[in-house]
Image (spheres, rainbow, N blue to C red):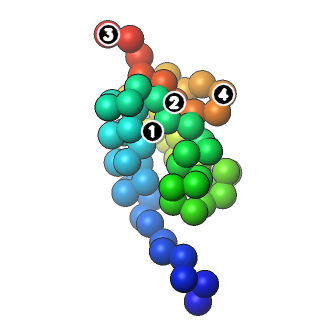
Amino acid sequence: MTGAITVLPELRHRWIVEQVLTVGAVTVREVAQRFHVSASTANRDCDRVGTRIGRRVHGGIVRDPL
C-alpha cells in the first residue's frame, strides 16, 4: 500500500462542480494535484463535467457568464 487515498469519481466530479460554481473556474492541474490522480484522469473528469456547468476550455473549465 502506498498510503494514497482513492477518491471515487463522483466525489471528484462534485468537487469540480463546487469549484466552478464558487470560484468560477478549475484547472486540470488543480484536480490532479488535489486528488493525486494523473493529468489524464483529471482531464477526463473535466470532460465529463465541463459542459453541464460551464464551458470546457484548454486546461480546465470556466463558468459561463450569467
The Cα atoms of the two marked residues, 2 and 3, are separated by 15 Å
Q: Is residue 14 left or right of residue 6?
A: left
Q: Pinpoint residue 7: horizontal percent, then vertical percent.
A: 44, 66
Disc 1 designates what residue?
A: 49
- Residue 57, disc: none
What amino acid is found at the position of numbered circle 1 in the picture?
Val
Disc 2 designates what residue?
A: 61
Q: Is residue 40 left or right of residue 50?
A: right
Q: Give the mark nearest the N terminus, 1 or 4.
A: 1
The Cα atoms of the two marked residues, 1 and 4, are separated by 14 Å
Check the image and name the residue furthest to the top.
66
Disc 3 designates what residue?
A: 66
- Residue 58, disc: 4
Look at the numbered discs 2 and 1 and tell me whether their residues touch, using CB distance below 8 Å: yes
The Cα atoms of the two marked residues, 1 and 3, are separated by 18 Å
Look at the numbered discs 2 and 4 and tell me whether their residues touch, using CB distance below 8 Å: no
Q: Pinpoint residue 52: horizontal percent, then vertical percent.
A: 39, 30
- For the residue labelled by badge 1, is the local secondary structure a helix, a strand or a loop? helix
Mark 1 or 3, which is nearer the eye? 3
